[in-house]
Amino acid sequence: GKEKADWTHCFHFSSETPLERRKCPKGTHHFKAAPVTPIAIRSFPKHASEPAVQALHWDDEQWERYELIANAFLQIQLSNYAPRSHGSWHQLGGYGRFQQSLPDSLESGECELFLQIGTDEWASNMMWGDGGELSFLAPTNKLSAGQLDDLRGDLQCG
């Protein structure tokens, strides 16, 4: 169907606000709760069309060498931090993983990745397509100001 404005909501509460479990609204799909442990890791551009990569004016050979190094580093990270992952993970900020293509709003620099929720069938029974990611993008100017009132969703799978 056609996208509708205001279909995605993100709620932010101050750190003084205690968390409380709430029931999911009727008619919505929900996933079982799973513990989360944030780990700070490096993320690197994974698409040649990323603005940070485009600014380097690399030729195909330079991009291919970079890609080999970045993929090797990613495999090391995954084996340490997400050993049961089949290439999908959760991420807050940084350079996301997009299985089909880099979303136009990221390629143009209009948006940045806010949150990416990967397939996590072993912990929460979440499966996006056949092992993809659900991503939330925020306009760059709003994200840098801490405003999350204009998130855009993107679902991609292999």
Image (tube, rainbow, N blue to C red):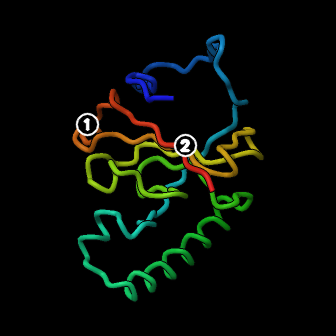
Residue 104, image x, y percentages: 35, 51
Where residue 149 sits, quadrant-wise, is top left
Where residue 42 sits, quadrant-wise, is bottom left
**Contact (CB < 8 A) between labels 2 and 1?**
no
Apparent side of residue 77 relative to residue 43 in the rendered image (left or right): right
Query: In the rendered structure, which amino acid carries the disc numbered 2?
Result: Leu
Q: Which of the labelled discs sits on residue 113, or is there none?
A: none
Apparent side of residue 52 relative to residue 38 in the rendered image (left or right): left
Query: In the rendered structure, which amino acid carries the disc numbered 1?
Result: Lys
Mark-to-mark CA distance, 2 and 1:
20 Å
Apparent side of residue 111 relative to residue 92 in the rendered image (left or right): left
* Numbered disc 1: secondary structure: helix
Residue 60, image x, y percentages: 38, 84
Q: Is residue 113 visible?
A: yes
Q: Earlier along the polypeptide chain: callout 2 or callout 1?
A: 2
Residue situated furthest bottom in the rendering:
61
Q: Is residue 13 visible?
A: no
Residue situated furthest front in the rendering:
1
Residue visible at 54% across and 74% down?
71
* Mark closer to the observer (2, 1): 2
Residue visible at 67% across and 52% down?
131
Q: Which of the labelled discs sits on residue 142, or is there none?
A: 1
Few, some or many residues within 10 Å of mark 2 (<14, 14–19, 20+): many
**In the image, is residue 58 above or below residue 77?**
below
Residue 57, image x, y percentages: 25, 78
Q: What residue does disc 2 label?
A: 134
